[in-house]
Image (spheres, grey):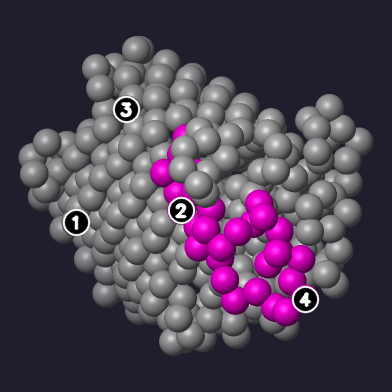
Amino acid sequence: MPGLRLLILLALLSMLSISATAQQQQEDSLTFEYFPFAMYDTDVGVGAGVKTVLRHGLGLRESFDLLLFASSKGERLVRLGISWPDAELRQGSTYDIALDLLFDYDKMIHTTYYGVGPGARFEDREVYTSEPILLRAGLSRGFTAEMVGTVQAKFERIWSYGFAGDSRLRDAARNASTSDQFSLMAQWRYDTRNSVLHTSRGMVIQMELEQALDVGAHAGEWTRVGALAQYYTMLASTVLAGRAILQHMEGEDIPVQQLLSIGGNSTVRGLPDNRFLDQSSLVVNVEWRVPLWWKFGAILGVDAGAVERSADRLPAARWNVTPVAGLRLAFETFVVRGDVGWSPDAVGVYLNFGQVF
């Protein structure tokens, strides 16, 4: 089965991961954790990487989050996030300013394209290589313990190549080999979660507006609006979690690489990456999270999603619903996530970090 991942995510690796915390009961204590991992994918080959987080290393309640991955067939990932104060430490508090920086480089040698719209056919799948590089900077303020405002600037460049001779993308001007995105975003969030990383109760209501600017030869102009709702509640020692995301983009000739997508490890698991693309999307996820033993837990869930050209057509759109099961390995500063999702197109197996929501 193309793209099936066999994950070597053994308990032995979790034993090798280090958690060095000066005082576990104090939120401002020095914490350093890392997790090495290995995997095999029929598309990308044998791969290995490491996830590390250093919190309060400079004594400023900051965090440095680094993820490195490389595979034998050329897949590459470098992701560095810096937060001051750390998102977990500032959760549920009032603060004047917080800074979040992200650098992300991800060479994906098997990027998939099926077409645009809810009617895109699996048999029309084509594969090419993409190299996105992302720089993002955000400033936030906690006006109250629950009300947070954020402004963010983002630059993303995507190099695309390796198209097949009969590719539908190769000769389309809007999907040129280089695509740039310069955007500014404003976000308002009402957030009562008891934790960002290990949420067991609370809710999130979030609204955001993003504007892409027509700057340079490879950039276009579009507007994206989004609304998100999340809810968490305890059921005995387990957690029931739910999420809904509604998004819409306005613009002409938006590059395929920037359209809204469902499929892959963060929206509708089981559907292949970028299975459906369009200018409006709605995603709903429900998970039942169960503790197992030590730092291990499990989830059972259902993902659902749809895309359309306009948001008013989403209620009657073709919905894609997939059952999901997974394992979790929870450290103090991050969560290791392994999921399996089932769809008529494929069985998706995913290794990632952090809860889906």
Q: Nearer the viewer, residue 131 or 35?
A: 131
Depicted 306 relative to depicted 47: above or below? above
Residue beneath label 3, please?
139
How crowded pointer 3 is (Cα within 10 Å; few <14, some 14-19, many 20+) is rated as: some
How crowded pointer 4 is (Cα within 10 Å; few <14, some 14-19, many 20+) is rated as: few
Residue at disc 1, secondary structure: strand
Q: Nearer the viewer, residue 246 or 18?
A: 246
As drawn, the residue found furthest toward the top would be 144
Kindly identify the amino acid type of the residue bearing the numbered disc 2. Answer: Arg
Q: How far, Cα to Cα, is label 4 from label 3?
A: 45 Å
Kindly identify the amino acid type of the residue bearing the numbered disc 1. Answer: Phe
Q: Are the residues flagged by discs 1 and 4 in contact, CB closer than 8 Å?
A: no
The stretch in magenta equals 155-183
Residue 170 falls within the magenta-colored stretch: yes
| Residue at screen point 74% across, 45% down | 278
Residue beneath label 1, please?
32
How crowded pointer 1 is (Cα within 10 Å; few <14, some 14-19, many 20+) is rated as: many
Residue beneath label 2, please?
157
Q: How far, Cα to Cα, is label 1 from label 2?
A: 32 Å
Residue beneath label 4, please?
166
Q: Nearer the viewer, residue 34 or 208?
A: 208
